[in-house]
């Protein structure tokens, strides 16, 4: 992993509505900079960043609009987000913010990650990505936490590896740093575990060199939506008098919808193959009269 001399940290937070991005940003900065919603409606409407205070004055956090599972991403918000991030030189880290109590990744959060990947060069991008699990309560026992962390990693890592292959075609086994925090603890509670996790996050981030932005700065996001279509193709692999062996190919392709309404498709790709053997029915008992 590339590392530099700067002790500053500049990071982008992305995630779904209600996953705690803005609260996490405030906790990292040690000051209230981002508005926090108390409902399921997104509070952050545009991408914006701030520096922290005190010993966090060299930390710059960029908050992005939360993505709702039931709605499409707004074109204006996407363009404003892309433009803002491009204007910020020296971005070192992309933080995927996930709710510890929810399913791993929604489709829209996956799309958001792909969009962010589109802003930066593909080479080395994933080395600048980490995951922060929010709402990991301060009073959860260490044993229970370890069990849940193991489960979360087992579910998330395959999805992240698939994202890597879908975007950069990189087969390298990348280690994604993960941090578990309670960024909205009860007042007066002992939240030292979260403090230590945030320190680890900042230590990781501040030693990263900025993500190199060699792409054309005029490049725009082409697709408003990317849907995955699937189909199964069944064929006979081999056959004899006693049995038939079938082959089933599970295929996927992307349906890409542009902001201009144009729909295009990628080629079908085989994701997995299954085989099954069926015994032919016996005809020895049949008598023709």
Image (cartoon, helix red, strand yellow):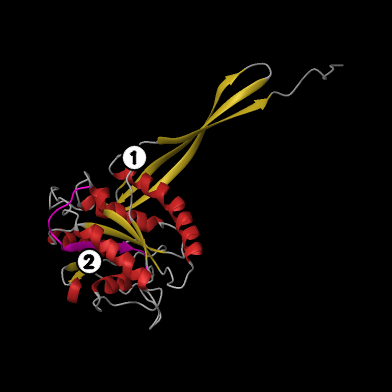
Name the outermost residue toward the right. Answer: 289
Please give the name of the residue rendered at 22% of the width and 62% of the height, measured from the top-left corner.
11
Of tags 2 and 1, the one toward the viewer is 2
Percent position of residue 108, x then y:
37, 58
Quarter of the image where one finds residue 207: bottom left
Tell whether 176 sits left or right of 77.
right
Is residue 245 depicted above or below 122 in this figure?
above
Tell me the magenta residue range.
1-17
Could you say which is closer to the camera, residue 113 or residue 154? 154
Provide residue 102's location: percent of width, then percent of height. 46, 63
Is residue 99 visible to us here? Answer: yes
Residue 266 bears which disc, if any? 1
Q: Earlier in the sequence, mark 2 or mark 1?
A: 2
Check if residue 252 falls in the magenta segment: no
Q: Marks 2 and 1, how far apart in space?
A: 33 Å
Q: Secondary structure at mark 2?
A: strand
Binning the other alpha carbons within 10 Å of mark 2 as few (below 14), some (14 to 19) or many (20 upward) gives many
Label 2: which residue? Answer: 62
Residue 74 drawn at (x, y percent): 29, 63
Q: Residue at x 24, y 64 (%)?
A: 76
Name which residue lies at 43% across and 44% down: 229
Front-most of 253 and 166?
166
Q: Nearer the viewer, residue 218 or 58?
A: 58
In the picture, the quarter occupied by the C terminus is top right
Point out residue 48 in the picture as x, y percentages from the top left corner: 20, 69
Magenta segment includes 8: yes
Q: Is residue 149 left or right of residue 202?
A: right
Say which element carries label 1.
loop
Examine the rendered structure and indicate whether residue 11 appears above or below residue 32: above
Disc 1 crowd, CA 10 A, few/some/many (<14, 14-19, 20+): few
**Residue 259 makes an appearance in the image:** no
């Amino acid at each position: 992993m590339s590392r530099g001399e700067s002790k500053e940290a500049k990071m982008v937070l992305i995630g779904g509505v209600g996953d705690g991005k803005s609260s996490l940003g405030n906790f990292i900065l040690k000051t209230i900079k981002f508005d926090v919603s108390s409902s399921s409606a997104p509070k952050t409407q545009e991408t914006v960043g701030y520096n922290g205070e005190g010993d966090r004055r060299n930390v710059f956090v960029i908050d992005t609009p939360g993505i709702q599972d039931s709605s499409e991403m707004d074109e204006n918000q996407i363009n404003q987000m892309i433009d803002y991030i491009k204007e910020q030189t020296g971005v070192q880290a992309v933080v995927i913010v996930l709710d510890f109590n929810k399913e791993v990744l929604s489709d829209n959060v996956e799309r958001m990650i792909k969009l962010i990947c589109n802003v930066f060069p593909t080479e080395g991008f994933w080395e600048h990505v980490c995951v922060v699990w929010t709402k990991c309560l301060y009073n959860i026992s260490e044993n229970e936490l370890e069990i849940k962390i193991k489960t979360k990693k087992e579910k998330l890592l395959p999805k992240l590896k698939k994202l890597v292959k879908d975007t950069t075609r990189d087969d390298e086994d990348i280690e994604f740093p993960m941090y578990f925090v309670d960024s909205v603890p009860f007042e007066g509670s002992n939240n030292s575990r979260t403090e230590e996790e945030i320190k680890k996050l900042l230590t990781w981030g501040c030693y990263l060199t900025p993500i190199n932005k060699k792409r054309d700065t005029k490049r725009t996001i082409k697709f408003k939506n990317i849907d995955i279509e699937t189909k199964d193709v069944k064929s006979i692999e081999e056959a004899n008098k006693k049995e038939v062996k079938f082959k089933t190919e599970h295929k996927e392709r992307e349906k890409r919808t542009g902001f201009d309404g144009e729909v295009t498709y990628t080629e079908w790709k085989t994701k997995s193959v299954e085989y099954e053997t069926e015994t032919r029915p016996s005809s020895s008992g049949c008598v023709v009269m």
